[in-house]
Image (spheres, grey):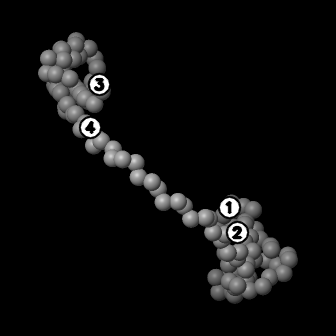
Amino acid sequence: MNLKEIREIIELLKGTDVIELEVVRGEDVLKVRRGPTGDVQPVAAVTTPKPPPAGPPTEAPSPAPPKEPPKPAAKEVISPIVGTFYRAPAPDAAPFVEVGSRVTKGQILCIVEAMKIMNQIES
């Protein structure tokens, strides 16, 4: 974009109510904004540099075969609701279960508070 084209764009904008205009032509960017007095002022004419040419393609190292993650000794329990998690029934009480302890089916694991209701989560 040359200076003549920029001046033509500014002259065209003088007779309009356009406050801001951005023109992109190839790698050239021209941003024009109307000032507080109403005068059209070019803000910036930016030319983006061309990226350097790419070199010869390099071979990516062959990916290692995916390793099977070790199976945890514990089973993950996912809460059926979203809320605040409590390990114990009261701040000064012992937790329902400790990390690594064995639990039985139906045993209370925690409390999840959702919408002011305390919900016991069982194993």
Residue 21 place in picture, x, y as percent: 28, 24
Q: Quadrant of the N terminus?
A: top left
Residue under label 1: 82
Secondary element at tag 1: loop
- CB-based contact (under 8 Å), mark 4 and mark 1: no
Q: Position of residue 113 (x, y in %)?
A: 69, 67
Q: Name the amino acid type tagged 3.
A: Arg
Residue 28: tell me if it is visible.
yes
- Give me the disc on residue 25: 3
Relative vertical location of residue 61 with respect to residue 90 in this rendering, above or below: above
Few, some or many C-alpha atoms within 10 Å of disc 4 (few <14, some 14-19, many ≥20)? few
Q: Specify whether 44 is left or right of 80.
A: left
* Residue shown at the point (85%, 76%) measured from the top left: 106
Q: Kindly identify the amino acid type of the residue bearing the numbered disc 1.
A: Val
Q: Quadrant of residue 100?
A: bottom right
Which percent across, then down, holds residue 98? 70, 85
The residue where tag 2 is placed is 112
